[in-house]
Amino acid sequence: MRRLWLLFSQTVTIALAALFVISTLKPTWIGFGLSATAPKQAPTVVTIQDASSKPAALPAPGSYSAAALKAMPAVVSITTSKTPQRLPGRDAWLRQFQGGRQPTVGLGSGVIVSPDGYILTNNHVVEGADQIEVTLADGREAKATLVGRDPDTDLAVLRIQLTDLPVITFGNDANAHVGDVVLAIGYPFGVGQTVTQGIISALGRTQLGINTFENFIQTDAAINPGNSGGALVDANGNLIGINTAIFSRSGGSLGIGFAVPVSTARNVMQQLISTGQVVRGWIGVEPQDVTDRLARALNLPHPEGVVIVGVLRNGPADAAGMRPGDVVLDVNGKLVSNTGQLLNAVAGLKPGSEAALQVLRDGKAATLHIRIGTRPQSLSQNQPAEDSEGVLP
């Protein structure tokens, strides 16, 4: 019995030793009811996502990219050319040696305001041009025809014959406030479409000597030569002004730019498209601001209103009994405190209508009822003198 137990124990020991050796050196030989071949593991797949496959990132906080993208397609570049006048004699002699006189080229901007191809820009951009070419933001080009221009507000309307045109959305400058963020969009110096950002610095700027009728939006958004006729838009991308001029000693932006309010531009545009000219009210007077010295001379309690220093004989004001020395306080209930406000108030009246002007005469209030006439078409272009700091970019 002992011998059997010894034999059994030796057999078990040898079997365990053999099992240990096999499991260590050849583990695949032992299946334990499973397949002798271990299943292969599925290869690891690494997914790589580049930036182009990611969803578009939201604009950063404080970004005005949505406003810019909304307005930019409707802002165009305008290139004009003007052939110099040929002079007899000496000019013909010079052309033999200078290869002829080359046409002058001007650059500016414009805003598409209608799917019919109407474009708002500045009068000084297209004044005297023999040829006008427009380049859209999408690269399309077209020759433009001049629909009409208004030197008194420095505005002009062009038209191009293209389809599928992007159109600006009109805003309301009456809702604009000092401190509102604005974007100026145009083509400064011919470098390409450019967007600059700033705020509204002032409203109702007048007496700058730039235009006959002035009611500018002032902004510190950078405006440079080539920006003229471009768009001034609000933070939602809506048009609130047409960039017109800058105040600069160097010709570049110093943070003082001026835009014609969209309400004025829209009225001028509609009249130019309808009739080719702008009709304004007129009473035939020469106004002057009331200064402290003038107020004392006229025995006024304080400087207010606009003094009339000249009345056109047989003009509307003369027919109503207005005299030099009268001080106009309001027009149809609208107060006027300077010549610019008086000009704008009268110009906005319909020719043929009757207006009530409140005046002071010899210290006494009086009301004059004037039949409004039609303002003669401007003969001057109302551009600043060469030594003026007002610059038409």
Image (cartoon, rainbow, N blue to C red):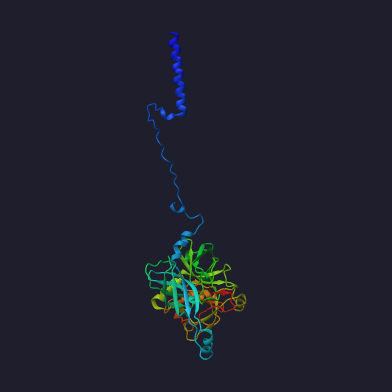
The answer to whether any part of residue 338 appears in the image is yes
Q: In which quarter of the image is the N terminus?
A: top left
235 over 155 or under it: above or below: above
Image-based side of 8 in relation to 247, left or right: left
* 131 or 359: nearer the viewer: 131
Where's residue 295, x and y in %?
A: 60, 76
Residue plotted at (45% across, 27% down): 23
Where's residue 150, x and y in %?
A: 46, 77
Where's residue 193, x and y in %?
A: 49, 67
Where's residue 248, x and y in %?
A: 58, 72
Q: Which residue lies furthest to the top in this view?
A: 1
Q: In which quarter of the image is residue 238?
A: bottom left
* 76 or 341: nearer the viewer: 76
The answer to whether any part of residue 153 appears in the image is no
Q: Which residue lies furthest to the bottom in this view?
A: 89
* 344 or 149: nearer the viewer: 149
Residue plotted at (61% across, 79% down): 297
286 over 194 or under it: above or below: below
- Counting the numbered discs, the total is 0
Residue plotted at (44% across, 11% down): 5
86 over 183 or under it: above or below: below
